[in-house]
Amino acid sequence: MKFSLSWLKAHLESSATIDEVADCLNRIGLEVEGIENPAAALGDFRIAKVLSAEPHPQADKLQLLSIDPGDGKPLQVVCGAPNARAGMLGVFGPAGAVIPSNGMELKIAKIRGVESNGMMCSEAELEVGDDHDGIIELPDDAPVGEVYAGWAGLDDPVIDVAITPNRQDCMGVRGIARDLAAAGLGELKALEIPQIEAPEPCPVEIRTDDPEGCPAFYGRVISGVKNGASPAWMQARLKSAGQKPISALVDITNYVMLDHGRPSHAYDLAKLSGAVVARKAKDGEKVTALNEKEYALTSDMTVIADDKGVHDIAGIMGGIDSGCSQDTRDVLLEIAYFTPENIALTGQALALTSDARMRFERGVDPAFLDDAVQIITAYILEICGGKASDIMRAGAPPAAQRSVQYDPALCLSLGGIAVDQAKQWQILESLGFAVDGSWKVTVPTWRRDIDGPPDLVEEVVRMVGLDNIKSVALPRAEGVAKPTATPAQELERKLRRIAASRGLKEAVNWSFISEKEAAALGGGDWVLANPISEDMKAMRASILPGLLSAAQRNMDRGASSVRLFEIGRRYFKAKDGASDERLTLGLVLAGERSSRSWASGKAQKFDAFDAKAYVTTLLDAAGVDTERLMVMDGAGDHYHPGQSATLRLGPKNILAAFGLLHPATAKAFDLTGPIAAAEIYIDAIPPKKAPGFMRPAYSPPPLQAVTRDFAFVVPEALAASDLVAAVRGSDKTNIVAARVFDRFTGGSLPEGKVSLAIEVTLQPLDKSYTEQDLQTISEKVIASAAKLGAELRG
Amino acid sequence: MSDTEQLKSEALGAIEGADSLDALEGLRVGYLGKQGSISALMKTLGQMSPEEKKVQGPLLNGLRNDVAEAIATRKAKLETAALNAQLASERMDMSLPGPETAKGSVHPVSQVMEELAEIFADMGFAVAEGPEIEDDWRNFTALNIPETHPARAMHDTFYFPDKDDSGRAMLLRTHTSPVQIRTMTSEEPPIRIIAPGRVYRSDSDATHTPMFHQIEGLVIDRDIHLGHLKWTLETFLRAFFERDDVVLRLRPSYFPFTEPSVEVDVGYSIEKGKRVIGGHGDDADGGWMEVLGSGMVNRRVIENCDLDPDVWQGFAFGTGVDRLAMLKYGMDDLRAFFDGDARWLGHYGFDAQDVPTLSAGVGARI
């Protein structure tokens, strides 16, 4: 909402400066978004008199002017304007001045061989009007030498205020003036409602057939008008509000909307036929609005129509066919009350915003229909002439009077500030509330936003000033603050910091990806109806796409090695149609695990086991006994089918998947070379049982552990982890660890066989092993392995 | 000179002259080995008379011991020399780099969320969470934003074509405020929570991204008023920026879910071309910047959660986590937060060990 200071002061008796006004607006909740003074750019331009005008010796279309800039020292100026002549007064820009329209700085320069000391300016050049054919002509009594902008009344700063959606009353300058007056910045001037003698009945029938959408439709005809330009003062105010003057009739309705927050509509009566009716549109009915777009209407939308068709999308935008033009002679003025909810739904459905909709959907003052008709009529009669008929009233606006039972103690108990009752009373009354002795507060008709006692607290505290509220500490529990993080939150934090400590950089990627990317990793349950772009359309069902895209961008920037992780949600649909969001850690390893080096030679690429190492480290940190996990297939089609796996706690509970990315998946993300990746399904990790501080008892065994190596020849298809598990399980008392330390195929081994060498760690308990003990254990190991088809190598 | 002395002098000379461990071993065998000359002399002791023994015994034993000691000394010397020579041959250029280790980092959003959790934990606030795909009842209606409310249109909401089983339209939450509803409908007051998380708005330009992070705060209790809200925000911002001179300016505003509603500006000054939080905004070189929206929870919201607004009241606030991170740590491009550029993550990310603690200050210093 933009308006000039002088406009504000047409309603507010105040000597406040623009800065005082702005401070006050901010203090009471009308946020100032900007202040601009159109005169600021015109300070160098002064009123000057043309003393003489002679032809330019070198150019037909130019004249040599001698001007008096006000100091009695005539200056020579070259001028191309046809209207420049001796004796006229105009606006002079001296050397050094900057032309607002093009930003050029004027300099003393020769034009066609003759020196020019500045410029006589046109309206367009100074951006004070559209005329660019000639230089500005001022009346003879204009004071030569004075700053033009000041004399012309342009030194009038414009304030831009952000109006919150609850304050419809401040979508008119008068409402803002009322708030400022209540805040003590001045007096609200009385509003005089013109009384218009109009004995003739309205010649057009006005009706509302839609009392739900349009409870009240008032109108009158003003006949014999002349629709020329609106007066300069009105044009200046419209311009300060950012509106372009169009014609008197249009400008008057716009002006009253901005002045009083009250939209209205003026029809050219000659273009209407029969009764003018507010009714519901028919499905499929069409209207071309003033923005020259055609809208298809539905039966839940209110329109204003005549016998021929729709002329107005009620409360939102008029139709192009029945609007006023220069030829309009008779006007039908419409002042209606439209139900805010209906306006909002119609506006949303048509995706059509307008100044009128903004006001109607927030709820205009239901008690300000008659007065608005009179104010608008008076302007029309004054500016366009003509004769007004009586007002015809169809329906009635909703009852405007509401009241709130208030308790002034609420100001302290909710607002946190003690304001004495008399002061609260005075504030409410100055805002237009009526207060009776029992604190029954009658709400002014223009304050639709006031809903209950807390709203009245807000009115009081914003006028007293929120800065006067004193801080009061929240009560604090005794002792040291109690921990608040849930086990899941603790786990997430721990995984994040373990991942970062192991060389992974945490990224935060978009939750939405393209449908193509989603499809490359198994699709997704949620696709946006109104995405901001095709790249951000499907909610990710895998944590990897964002990481892969990020890896690709890094590689494109020349990175040789990328290690990224993200902890975020994957989005699924639950049975009840709600969202099922699962916290997941994803990691991507692209490029080189180690770069070429003087010590180790060639660069090494990442492989699936790099991803596995990260996964086991992280799961281990999460409290999972990773040695007990089952290694199974099923990591997903986006992985290399032979170099990927899942880690499961039991056959159905998948804790993680890892592996080398499938080349087709890598290609879908424009990645080349081996890419390792992993996903840890954090939500699948079982919570720790009975967490506490006490560790299980332990003292390091006094006797030294011994190791024994076994080399087995096994079928190639046997998983090493199965063999290790069998070996470990063969003597649970003595064997504390077993690990594969060598694997080879070929050589002397038959086809389909592989050799696995396992180091077994034995921990003696109370006495050292004898040869016989070791022999017994070895036999158990071999027997257990044999069940899997493993033969001890000779 | 006796034979013994001559032998000793000759042996010691030879030992001293031995220039390798092999040569020295040869000498040892020659003198002290089973067939060695000194060993042979020792054997003659057995045939000697007791008188002769008394004289020759100490002499020969002395000879043997002296030679053995000389050999040991010489051996140690030769070994040291050999080791030194070997070490000298093993000299390497210690200016060469060691094996590289990859350096990881924690994203600024995660770091700042943890800082906030730490600060608010001290004030008794737990961290609450809710889904990012929400229904329109929790995101709007329950928060006193009915379908026809102009504020709903101002949210630039991303919608899904889907409805849940109760017929509610599904959308991406536009703020963390639905967590207020989830908390109030599932927990008994008193309530003190913060709710950080991802939020979404259909908006993208230099300072807006379609996904960003907010943190919501909610206190529901008896006798809570705007003074408590002011204290909480002041205390939190002072702890977060670790400055005692953080000054707030409260302005009336409007949010459908709070009444009264308060917009909070914080004073800053310009240092080295950047806005630095602290000081009074009206000071020379100072200014005010909007950082928080807040207010007393609207009675209708409390009612919508089946709580009695005559018993329970409280406040709520919300602010941008990304924005707080930028103000504290100096990043100036929001879009870079979501680009995953390893160089940016390395520069603005945090060390894994920078765990926010109250004792060390929640912020991570450089």
Image (tube, coloured by chain):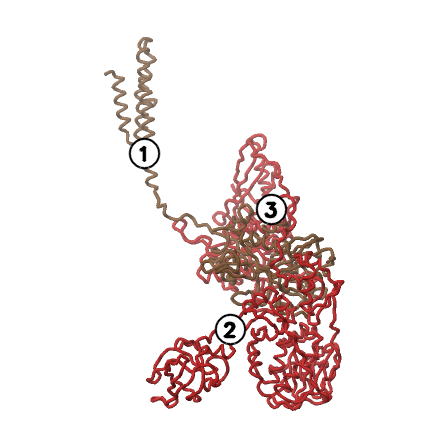
Chain colours: A red, B brown
Looking at the image, residue A624 lies above or below residue A290: above
Residue A275 drawn at (x, y percent): 73, 87
Q: Which amino acid does label 2 sit on?
A: Asn
For mark 2, does the 10 Å Cα neighbourhood hold few (<14), some (14 to 19), or many (20 or more) residues? Answer: some
Q: How far apart are marks 2 and 1 (CA)?
A: 92 Å
Q: Is residue B29 left or right of residue B360?
A: left
Residue B81's disc is 1
Q: What residue type is labelled 1?
A: Ala
Q: Residue A47 appears in which quarter of the rendering?
A: bottom left
Query: Do the CB atoms of the residues marked 2 and 3 lie less than 8 Å apart?
Result: no
Q: Distance between the residues labelled 1 and 3?
A: 54 Å
Residue B41 drawn at (x, y percent): 31, 17
Query: Do the CB atoms of the residues marked 1 and 3 lie less than 8 Å apart?
Result: no
Frontmost residue, B254 versus A92: A92
Q: Does any portion of residue B122 appear in the rendered image? A: yes
Q: What residue type is labelled 3?
A: Gly
Q: Mark 1, chain letter? A: B
For label 1, the SS is helix
Residue A37's disc is 2
Looking at the image, residue A415 lies above or below residue A759: below
User: Mark 3 = which residue?
Assistant: A623
Looking at the image, residue A374 lies above or below residue A720: below
Q: Is residue B220 left or right of residue A596?
A: right
Residue A390's disc is none
For label 2, the SS is loop
